[in-house]
Amino acid sequence: MNTWDVVIVGAGAAGLFCAGVAGQRGLKMLVIDHSDKIAEKIRISGGGRCNFTNRLLDASAPQKHFISQNPNFCRSALSRYTPQDFIDLVQKHGIAFHEKHKGQLFCDHSAEDIIRMLLAECQAGGVEIRSGCSVKTVRHHTDGHAHYSLDTDQGTVLTPSLVVATGGLSIPKIGASDWGYRIASQFGLRLVERRPGLVPLTFDGAAWAPYAELAGLALPVGIETGDKKARMHFDEDLLFTHRGLSGPGVLQISSYWQEGTPIRLNLAPTLNLPDRLQEAKLRSKKLLGNELASLVPSRLADAWVSQDPALQRTAAEVPDKALSKLAEALSNWCLTPTGSEGYKKAEVTLGGVDTRDLSSQTMASKQPGLYFIGEAVDVTGWLGGYNFQWAWASGHACAMALPGAEIALPPSPNG
């Protein structure tokens, strides 16, 4: 009979991890994914080395690194399954890894190591995985014993517990879809508006022209957006692109940036530029552009100096007012993005299934027997391994809460 204790839709990080844990608890597990190639987001993450967690996640206040309409929702799962718990599993499987930056842990070899580990854990739990299998309809039956029937292109499956782990809308070329949100809506769950997160920002028009030529230039910056309590600041690297700005700093701030509002950049965060430029004026006979190129990347110096004739002379000859204006422009460059690169370049999806309709303890929804884990939920982490840790933690919370086969389901129509 095609009946299962639990069916998970989505063979990504959250779905595979949840299946492995629940399977090893003794539950009969089926994982379904519409893509022929499962776990593709893991495979391409971290430049192919998978930034699988972050050692700095504070289990007592994990919400510091996550965005949600209810930022405390994620605390329960993240404090019960910590980065160290996942590190222990990685070490158990003999996977070599290293810390790259600010607690970010990457595989030494390849993201494939994490995928193989998850599949090994699933195998240990007797999990069946059906890839290239699309779910056409989902129905909830309450006649006799409540259960779900899923009509797939590989037949109908029955289960009392359905876990949605289909992720968000980011990177559609590897199979992202809105299936999970549609299921949530079908069963009356609320959704928080979705938008791209951890995404490059774009700028249009003549105002961007002087900076488009800086494409490929990377440098450490301070970057912020918002005011007062809504102000958010990161010290990270910035990357100029032909269409705008990218790099870790921009990806981080993009999750907090609101359309139509500015971002502010300090392009020389470790320097007191007013003082350094005044010192250059007093002692130097070089062109100001040459002096500036000793403080910031030369291409950046050229881009700024070329926009103001007053700066195109020796440092000693530049008026104090022009020097002050230059220092302010580089230390507090205020600019308003016209948009972002959208889901095609976004690493995550902000928003999702409203946490008001979910249990933070079990990830169960108010719809009996229906669970949501991972990116489908309105919980989005910072860049740096936090979103994978949410996948592991939410998957683990769900797996430990799933009930066993306490009811006898009717036989599958397909035998």
Image (tube, helix red, strand yellow):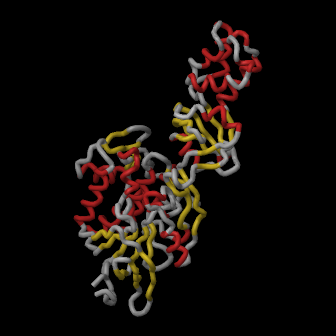
The reply to whether residue 37 is visible in this rendering is: yes
Can residue 80 be seen by looking at this rendering? no
Q: Look at the picture and state if 139 lies above or below 278.
A: below
> In this orientation, which residue lies closer to the viewer: 29 or 83?
29
Which quarter of the rendered picture does the C terminus lie within?
bottom left
Is 12 left or right of 236, judged from the image as shown?
Answer: left
Q: Is residue 405 left or right of residue 289?
A: left
With respect to residue 336, does 302 lie above or below?
A: above
The answer to whether residue 273 is left or right of residue 15 is: right
Which residue is painted at 58% across and 35% down in the image? 222
How many marks do you count on the picture? Answer: 0
Pinpoint residue 75: horizontal percent, then vertical percent.
47, 58
**Percent of width and height locating residue 154:** 34, 77
Place of residue 340 in the rendered image (x, y in percent of width and height, measured from the top left)? 60, 49
In this rendering, is residue 149 above or below 378? Answer: below
Residue shown at 40%/46% (left/top)? 46
Residue 285 appears at what percent x and percent y?
65, 6
Q: Residue at x 54, y 64 (%)?
A: 352
34 or 270, nearer to the observer: 34
Residue 412 lies in quadrant: bottom left
Q: Quadrant of the N terminus?
A: bottom left
Horizontal relation, residue 391 to residue 253: left or right: left
Between 407 and 19, the one lying in front of the other is 19
